[in-house]
Every structure is written in structure tokens, then in C-alpha cells.
Amino acid sequence: MISFILRRLGAGIILIFVVTTITFVLTYGANIPVARNILGPSATEAQVAALTSQLGLDRPLIEQYGSWISGLFQGDLGTSYFSSQPVAAAMGDRLPVTLSIVVLASILTLVISTVLGVASAVRGGALDAALQAITVIAYVFPGLVLGIVLVYVFAISLHWVPAIGFTPIEESVSGWFASSILPAVVLAIGGIAALAAQVRGSVIDELGRDYVRTLRSRDVSEGSILFKHVLRNAAGPAFTTFSLQFVSMFGAALFIERIFALPGYGTYAFTSTIAGDLPAMLGVTLFGVGLVVVVNLLVDLATGWLNPKARIS
């Protein structure tokens, strides 16, 4: 198991290196007029040239890359060209906002989809048909429309939660939950439908296998068969689907943050890209690739723990 973890970590580090290197070359080598964007159209060519030199953008690309890599090993992701704030600090301020809605959405997705998927597979009938209908509706129903409807009902009409803004958890737990729950629900809707369908299919497949019939012939209770055997074996595909959804939530969080005016990671990534803030763009890319590597590793470990056959393979 240790060798497996080391191999995956090694592959992950290589992936991070390759992706960030390609991103660096594409961004810093694209001749984006950063100095002109900062100073505005009224700046003279001399002022633009002076700021370009001050930022080090007139140096050879390999030197700029070497400086960035050297700072990266020291935990320095660079400084924003526009706000003069260290990128690591800026992302540290915004990540708790995005993590709040993503973690809440993930918990809702995992719990609700597991209950719906298992119940649909075991009970069948009307419940199964209802799940299929809900899945189709959730796929085609725009999240933007759902967000607006939820804001109107729960924030504007009922005044249960704030319509916009974010309250840090260290200031108020109840305020944090109230400002995070609606964005999390909107973010989770599509994921619940997809994961519930995956859980349903995996559980149905496992219930039809020979070992289930053997356990039933030995008078093992249905609850024991379901929770001790079927769910453990069905967890692998479901965890894979869940990991993909978890990562994709960070991308979808951009739209959710715009709807609810949340100062999160998605908004920071969007504004940095639009402005051409190269250090911020690299920091966002580095975090995104690192997130994919870590999530995939955790899913592999969880799958191996739940399913001994996967652990052996």
C-alpha cells in the first residue's frame, strides 16, 4: 500500500510540474500587455517599458520560469500585478469561501444520493421511477434559474437566509451556515442526480451477483448483506463519480459565487484571467491540478479500504 501511495504521489508531482510548466509558457510567452493593462491607455511607452522592466517581464522566458520555480519551492506563488497582494495570501483569503459551499454541497450530494440510490435499487417500483424522473429534471434544469428561485423564496420572501454575501465561520457559525447553504444546495442539485443514478446501478449489479445469493441461502439478513457486503463492493464506481463531481464543483462554484456575490476562489480565478494577472493565473492552475491529484489519491485509498479486491489489485 505504501509503494502504491508513493507511486501515485510521484505521478501526481510529475503531472503538476508538466501542467504548470505548460501554463507558464503559454501565459508568459503570449506577450500579454500586462504593463499596459495596469497603467491604462493614457500611459506613455516609456512608462510601459519601465513597468515591464520592474515586473521582470523583459527577461528571457527561462529566467522568469526559474525565478517562479525557485519561489514556489519556498512557498511563494508570486505577487499579483494588479493588487500587489501575494497570490498565496489572496487565495488563502478566498478558498474558505469556496470550500464552505463545496464541502456542504459534497456532504449533501453524498448523503442524499446514497440514500436515494440504495432505496431505489432495493425498493424499485414507484420510487425507482421517481428517481429516474428527478435525474432527468435535474440534468436539464438550469442551475442559474434554480439559484434565482431559491434566493427569491428563502432570502427575499421568507428572510430565512441572506441573499448575498458571506459570513466567516469564525465570526458566527449560524451566519456562516445561513450564507453557505443556498449556494451549496444549488451546487449539489446536479451532482445528487448523477451520483444517485450511479449508486443505483452499482447496487443493482451487486445484488445480482452470486455471493449475494450464497449469503441469502445461508439466511444472512438482508440488512447485513446490504451494508456489510453490497455497499462496500459498490463503493468504487460511486467514489470515482463523486471525486469527479467534487473537482468539477470548484469550476461550477464560479457561477454560484457570481449569483450570490461571494468573494471566493472561483471569482478570483475569473477576475485574474480576465485581467491577465499572470502570477494569480499560475497560482490558480497550481491549486487546481494539486486538488485533482489529492482527490484522486484519497478516492483510491477509500476504495481500497472499502473493497479488499481493489486494494489487492
Image (tube, helix red, strand yellow):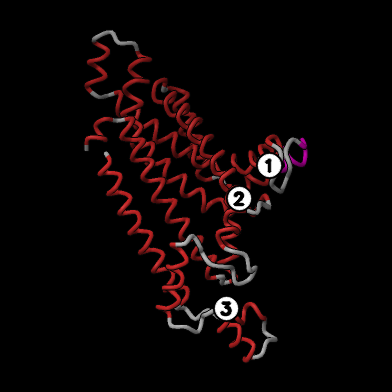
At 59% from the left and 58% from the top, the residue drawn is 89
* Residue type, label 3: Val
Disc 1 packing (10 Å; few <14; some 14–19; many ≥20): many
Mark 3 and mark 1 lie on one chain; the one further toward the N terminus is: 3
* Residue type, label 1: Ser
Determine the secondary structure under disc 3.
helix
At 47% from the left and 62% from the top, the residue drawn is 74
Instruction: Single out the mark in the foreground, 2 or 1.
Output: 1
Determine the secondary structure under disc 1.
helix
Q: Are marks 2 and 1 in contact (CB under 8 Å)?
A: no
Q: Where the C terminus falls, by quadrant?
A: top left
Mark 2 and mark 3 lie on one chain; the one further toward the N terminus is: 3
Determine the secondary structure under disc 2.
helix
Instruction: Single out the mark in the foreground, 2 or 3.
Output: 3
| Residue to which mark 1 is pinned | 179
At 74% from the left and 40% from the top, the residue drawn is 155
Q: Main secondary structure of the magenta part?
A: helix
Q: Return the mark for residue 256.
A: 2
Q: 305 and 119: which one is in front?
A: 305
Q: Give the magenta-colored segment's residue range.
A: 150-159
In percent of width and height, residue 279 lies at 53, 68
Q: Where the N terminus falls, by quadrant?
A: top left
At 55% from the left and 59% from the top, the residue drawn is 88
Disc 2 packing (10 Å; few <14; some 14–19; many ≥20): many
| Residue to which mark 3 is pinned | 34
Residue 276 position (above or below residue 87): below
